[in-house]
Image (cartoon, coloured by chain):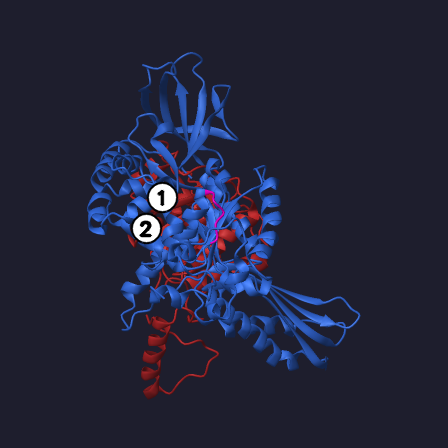
Amino acid sequence: MKNPDDTDQLPPFPASKNSITQIFRLSESTKTIKSKESPKCNKKQDSLWYALYFPQLEELSESRQKKLLSELASAVRQVSSEISFHSHALICEIRSSLKYFGGMERVHDKLAPVLNALLQQRGLPGYFLYAASPTVTGSLLLARSGHNVLVYQKNSLRSALGRLPTNVLRLSKEQNCRLYNMGVRYLRDIWRLPANGLHTRFGGDFVNLLNKALGKAPEPIHNYLPPPAFSTSYDLPFELKNLDRLSPVVDEVVAQLCEFLRHRDLCISHLLFSLQHEKRDNTEVDLALRRPNRSQEHLIMLLETHFSNLIIPAPVTGVKLKAKKFNAFMGRSNSLLAEDRPTSTHGSESDLDQFVEQLHAKLADNYLKCIRSVSEHCPEYANQQTDYGEPIGESCNGDGHRKGKEQEAQFVALAPRPLWLLREPKQLVLRNSKLYHRKAVTLISGPERIETFWWSGTDVCRDYYVAREASGSRLWVYRERTSDKNWYLHGYFA
Amino acid sequence: MTIIRTPSNTPQPSADKGYNHSVTIEKLLHSNPKLWRGCDIAGQGFRGQSTGFPQLDDILPSRGWPQSGLIEVITPCWGIGELQLLIPLMRSVVEQGKWVLWITPPHMPYAPALVQVGVNTDQILVVKRDTSCKDALWSMEKALQTSNFGLVLTWQNWLPGKVLRRLQLAAENGNTLGVFFKQHDSKYSPSQIRLKIKDSLVRSNNKEASDFSETEITVINARGNFRPLTTRVNLYQPS
């Protein structure tokens, strides 16, 4: 009566004398639900956010946290379709499912054993803190406080939150200290402070957080999307012996798939199309695409090509399509005008990255190498192998790189270098004062003397020659000038 | 000495129309690389990328390397000069801003040598030697389809015709040149060009020049050539 705003949002509640106690309902799990389920609530359905806070995740590494949270989220999906990730917490919309499950208590009973079991499986203590309120941030703060609170009305949120200590805000140490010095211990102390002052002292983020918690600011959330899965089937009303007659069905099934792909912004690279027969095993068409695609015509064309050389053991009674592998959709924009040049070069850049990514995915990580010449006297060290991606970063600092190359050009111009260098020099056989590798070796030119690393233990002291093997190969051989004076093969001119 | 000759088995066009015809034919021949004159002996087309060795240009159907397709280089053993043969091509590919991919070379390419011959090593990628054959061929096909690569070099010995055919198509689609280094020739391969490299020592009368060696290159098969042609090239520039 006193406050028209309160009365219009509150359900008819018998003891509405003291406005503060009415609005604020704090309960250990679900004692007050029944009175809440009044017809008036349905008229204006605010969402109710159910926060699940897992304090035990704090000790885990970031990647494990992420993995575990998405596992937990897939378990939470049985009660809600809107789930968002927060630090060490999951928040889901629950108002829409209350009626179906028969109240908050049931929802909690349904979730708790599953989540606890999941946590225990991962070797973590099986418990979690929870709270529900009409705002996402509000329920997160409530859950963090460990009170296991349910707040149904937006206007009771302020007092419910007011009871929480300031540490639920997870502020920086400095900000906490400042709040403490200001004499602020609980959130209700902050409520009394003017917003302008708070803004100047603690910044916009802080005020925004509080506003979000109170439902005064919009809270955009990022919903959890389960990994894509697509399968559809179609039962034919009659048996089909001729696969050509199947094409309308194929069209429709593929159209569904493409629709799904467009919605999720995906491409498909592997799908399984099975034809069902009566009392026989299904005939399966395993379609692995070379390039991920989502064009309906293309997929239908491919399927029909497969059908054209398919022999079915029995009439078809139904079809089933199952997507096995999805890829992200890579869109490409074409230029409006016919001038293809700029777009084609731009496209090819991304093509290259895509290709290299693909290669990386296919081969192990260290199989793809870049080579670079380094200003170094000793031949073994003048060649640098790096993984693809690293040298790009280096070539950004253009000048130094370019300079190095010029030096290189000067350095390498002195004497011939082989296109292939052996990883380990291979000793040549000296027989009757003639050298042999696979066949007899004759020296053509040289020597080029390389002496380096005298300052370290591995002294390099060699005379290099260009040699010709009887088979026709040009070799780069050297003779050690120290110790044994052995001959070694070090490279091929190829 | 006419450059344009009509094959003898085709009906001769009448004299007045003949001129016009040959002009349109000539136009077509220029615009479509898949068309060539059956009677053309090697060395009369104009479309290829010069190999850098005039003697070899003379015996190749388009006076040089084709724009796209597969080239097989057959050598009795690795390192006989097959890479030297491709250095000018590699240089021009890199100058065009395209990349060169080396798939499973028997030894790691040596960057200083490449820099020495003027090939920018920034645009060279190498797939290491111990990659499986299947993965190597897979990467070759992918690279041939990608327009960034101007040249893909592969060292493989075992290749069935089906695989080659597929790679040939990939190369034609991606407008890329693929080069296979093999040690055995297979007669019915669908590659655009098959070359055989053999070393031959030139026995000169002059004693001082006795170490002078040339490489014998045989074009076993090339689209546009009727018969195998052989030339001798000095791959190693005198230093």
* Numbered label tally: 2
Read off the residue under disc 2: A209
Q: Which residue is mark 1?
A: A169
Residue in the image at 31% along x and 35% along y? A173
Q: Position of residue A394 (x, y in %)?
A: 29, 40
Which amino acid, mark 1? Leu
Q: B33 or A238: nearer the eye? A: A238
Q: Are marks 2 and 1 in contact (CB under 8 Å)?
A: yes
> Element type at marker 1?
helix
The 10 Å Cα crowd at callout 2, few under 14, some 14 to 19, many 20 or more, is: some
Q: Is residue B137 left or right of residue B95?
A: right
Chain A: colour as depicted = blue
Q: Element at badge 2?
A: helix
Identify the chain drawn in red. B
Q: Chain of mark 1?
A: A
Q: Which residues are magenta?
A: A146-150
